Image (cartoon, helix red, strand yellow):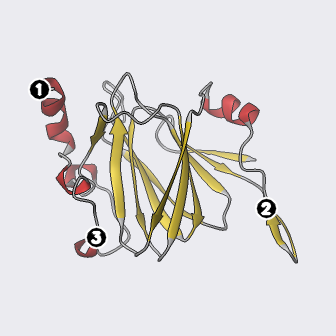
Amino acid sequence: MHIKRLNIEGPLLFESRLFQDERGYFTETFRQDAFREAAGDHVFVQDNRSHSKNPGTVRGLHFQKDPCAQGKLVTCLAGTIFDVAVDIRPGSRSFGQHVSTVMSGGDAVQFWIPPGFAHGFCTLTPDCLVAYKVTAYYSPDHDRGLAWDDPDLGIDWPFDVRQATLSEKDSRHPRLRDLAILEKEN
């Protein structure tokens, strides 16, 4: 397993080796010892999966506030996605900055997004299937989000953003600059 560090401390890409032959391929998708050595001692408590029918579907940017902040280990099982993690850790030197990657169903790449990051993705092809392990249970009381198209984040989404398909909830998330104000009010 190859581990790639990104330009923000915390998020990582885990790239597994594919063993291919005429039948298809085999890959090892998770090893606790390798993960712990690279990312720290995290315990996954819940697995999630999403299916998105159409290209241009945006899911996110989601996070949970403490004490229920989630780390996520994300993989694309089918289709192709553009996946993003935004640093929202108070006091971080990279606060408000993001890292991104493109993942496809056949590439055996997993994106580790530690607690303290907002996460989201958009689909680039039809019928995308995404799975992710999380380090904290879903908590509606701690569920939060950021506007996926916040210009202050500078995310260069690789599709026509005027064609984005979003949930009602995702279309109402605040910008990062408004998030601190909202958190103090709650």
- Mark toward the start of the polypeptide (3 vs 1): 3
What residue sits 36% from the left and 39% below the top? 63
What residue sits 45% from the left and 32% below the top? 115
Numbered label attached to residue 18: 2
Q: Measured from the top left, where is residue 50 in percent x and y?
A: 48, 58
What crowding class fits label 3: few (fewer than 14 Cα within 10 Å), some (14-19), or many (20 or more)?
Answer: some
Image quadrant where residue 22 sits:
bottom right
Judged left or right of residue 64, residue 29 is right
Please name the residue that numbered disc 3 is placed on. Answer: 164
Q: Marks 3 and 2, how far apart in space?
A: 33 Å
Residue type (three-letter) at the residue carrying disc 1: Glu
Q: Marks 2 and 1, how far apart in space?
A: 49 Å
Is residue 103 shown above or below 30? below
Helix, strand, or loop for circle 3? loop
Q: Marks 3 and 1, how far apart in space?
A: 30 Å
Is residue 69 shown above or below 129? above
Q: What is the residue that sits farthest to the top in this orientation?
A: 67
Do labels 3 and 1 touch, CB within 8 Å?
A: no
Please name the residue that numbered disc 1 is placed on. Answer: 185
